[in-house]
Image: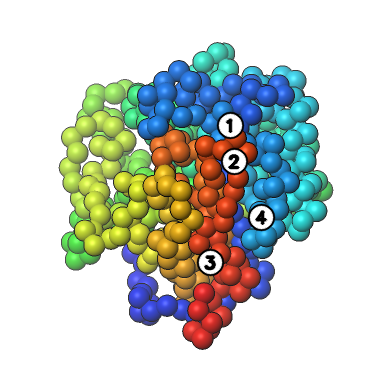
């Protein structure tokens, strides 16, 4: 069944209304991108430390996250910034190597102390912590030492042990847990095309990586469900990145089918198994056929055993969504035995979609609403946390960012339409990002922050941008109250 949202009302008409009274607003960051202190207080090396130190030429400006925003030393300053913005919630990630320097064994008390301090300061200021357990900074030992990273199934129990330790240490105060951030990036960019750490180029490892992450998420969910949920009363979900996939020609059935297929290969790859215990039928069909054509004895897409299928089914209390942009999708034969070749889709942008400094990010607000509607329709109207949404501009010293302000205003309004008109159960929105930070292979050449960070100043001062002023008002108003009160 192909589900193409038919959005009611005028897509271009701005909706003046407010969000539900219990809606939560805030910001998101990630440990490697902001913390710095890469080798302080017993922290172990992670794969991004190794990647940036060994191959600095891969990073656009040759930089690294050794200091980044220096948030390890600026807990009070960062919390004050959040409080000033009127944030209800702060999504941040834990550095696995800061807590377990080699991924397992004895915990590093200084690392635990740092996160306890951050959690306590947030709560003292009326801000709810939302923790991501894994945001790409794998302890190096688990890739370069005893294990070979996420394609190695021996990593699963180690991640579950790490997660359980965090539930024990922080779960009395933390009630929203995200197991993995953007596993598609981890597996496709980390282990297939090699564009992010650990930089592996191997087309056979992508699906193995995903299979292990799905199982690790589910086992973590079951541990929390059986041992901690009754006492701690928290929720466990996962964050998936997804652009809206718009048919290039909506009157062409092949393009319509390709757009749905692209959504299943990107979002359904993860949410399908975690909802129904199996990969999307279209993935199974296409990858099995390609594997047979390639002459492989088994499919490149692994199978779940009956026991595994039962364990992974219905293991998301909420779906976290990172959304930035929209792509045009057309049916296109790609004659190669790769993840991209398995899908047979071509991707492009419309010429009139406004650009950002990121080649992959065009400004298409209406796609946000369509994607929220598709997720709601596809997975039985789950609770959705928008865990990232934002705009990239160039490395400059200005706090005047009208394009980002417009981006937030229009994207948030499309989210409002998704809730009020389409019935989507979106309850949390954390903007990316609280401040400029280390943008992975772009280094500091690309900025996503609502607060400007001066990376040339040892003190790393933070200054609110125009977009921060806008978001503060939206948070305060809980939306867009009336056309007479323009935000």
Residue tagged 4: 82
Residue in front for this viewpoint, 28 or 73: 73
Disc 3 secondary structure class:
helix
Circle 2 crowding by C-alpha within 10 Å: few under 14, some 14–19, many from 20? some
CB under 8 Å between discs 1 and 2:
yes
Disc 4 secondary structure class:
helix
Nearest to the eye among marks 4 and 2: give it: 2
Disc 2 secondary structure class:
loop
Residue tagged 1: 67
Residue tagged 2: 460
Residue tagged 3: 470
Q: Is residue 290 left or right of residue 466?
A: left
Position of 339 relative to 205 (above/below): below
Circle 3 crowding by C-alpha within 10 Å: few under 14, some 14–19, many from 20? many
Q: Is residue 241 left or right of residue 298?
A: right
Disc 1 secondary structure class:
loop
């Amino acid at each position: 069944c192909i589900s193409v949202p038919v959005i009611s009302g005028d897509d271009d008409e701005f909706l003046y209304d407010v969000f539900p009274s219990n809606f939560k607003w805030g910001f998101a960051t990630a440990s490697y991108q902001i913390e710095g202190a890469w080798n302080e207080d017993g922290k172990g090396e992670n794969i991004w430390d190794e990647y940036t130190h060994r191959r600095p030429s891969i990073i656009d400006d040759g930089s690294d996250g050794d200091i980044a925003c220096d948030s390890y030393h600026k807990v009070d300053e960062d919390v004050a910034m959040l409080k000033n913005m009127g944030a209800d919630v702060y999504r941040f990630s834990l550095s696995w190597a800061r807590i377990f320097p080699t991924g397992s064994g004895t915990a590093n008390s200084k690392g635990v102390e740092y996160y306890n301090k951050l959690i306590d300061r947030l709560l003292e200021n009326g801000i709810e912590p939302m923790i991501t357990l894994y945001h790409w900074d794998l302890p190096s030992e688990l890739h370069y030492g005893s294990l070979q990273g996420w394609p190695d199934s021996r990593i699963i129990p180690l991640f579950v042990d790490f997660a359980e330790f965090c539930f024990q240490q922080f779960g009395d105060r933390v009630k929203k847990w995200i197991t993995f951030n953007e596993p598609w990036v981890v597996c496709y960019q980390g282990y297939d095309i090699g564009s992010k750490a650990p930089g592996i180029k191997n087309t056979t490892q992508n699906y193995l990586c995903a299979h292990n992450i799905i199982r690790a998420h589910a086992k973590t969910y079951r541990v929390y469900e059986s041992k901690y949920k009754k006492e701690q009363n928290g929720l466990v979900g996962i964050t998936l990145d997804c652009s809206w996939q718009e048919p290039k020609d909506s009157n062409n059935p092949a393009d319509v089918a390709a757009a749905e297929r692209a959504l299943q290969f990107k979002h359904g790859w993860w949410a399908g198994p975690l909802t129904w215990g199996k990969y999307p039928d279209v993935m199974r069909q296409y990858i099995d056929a390609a594997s047979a054509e390639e002459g492989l004895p088994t499919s490149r897409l692994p199978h779940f055993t009956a026991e595994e299928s039962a364990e992974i089914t219905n293991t998301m209390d909420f779906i976290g969504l990172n959304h930035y942009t929209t792509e045009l999708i057309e049916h296109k034969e790609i004659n190669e035995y790769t993840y991209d070749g398995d899908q047979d889709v071509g991707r492009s942008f419309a010429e009139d979609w406004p650009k950002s400094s990121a080649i992959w990010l065009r400004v298409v607000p209406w796609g946000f609403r369509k994607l929220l509607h598709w997720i709601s329709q596809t997975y039985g109207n789950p609770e959705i946390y928008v865990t990232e949404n934002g705009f990239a501009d160039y490395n400059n010293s200005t706090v005047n960012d009208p394009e980002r302000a417009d981006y937030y205003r229009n994207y948030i309004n499309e989210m409002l339409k998704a809730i009020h008109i389409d019935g989507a159960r979106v309850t949390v929105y954390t903007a990316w990002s609280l401040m400029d930070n280390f943008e992975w292979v772009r280094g500091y050449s690309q900025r996503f922050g609502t607060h400007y960070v001066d990376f040339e100043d040892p003190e790393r001062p933070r200054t609110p941008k125009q977009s921060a002023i806008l978001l503060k008002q939206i948070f305060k108003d809980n939306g867009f109250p009336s056309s007479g009160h323009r935000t």
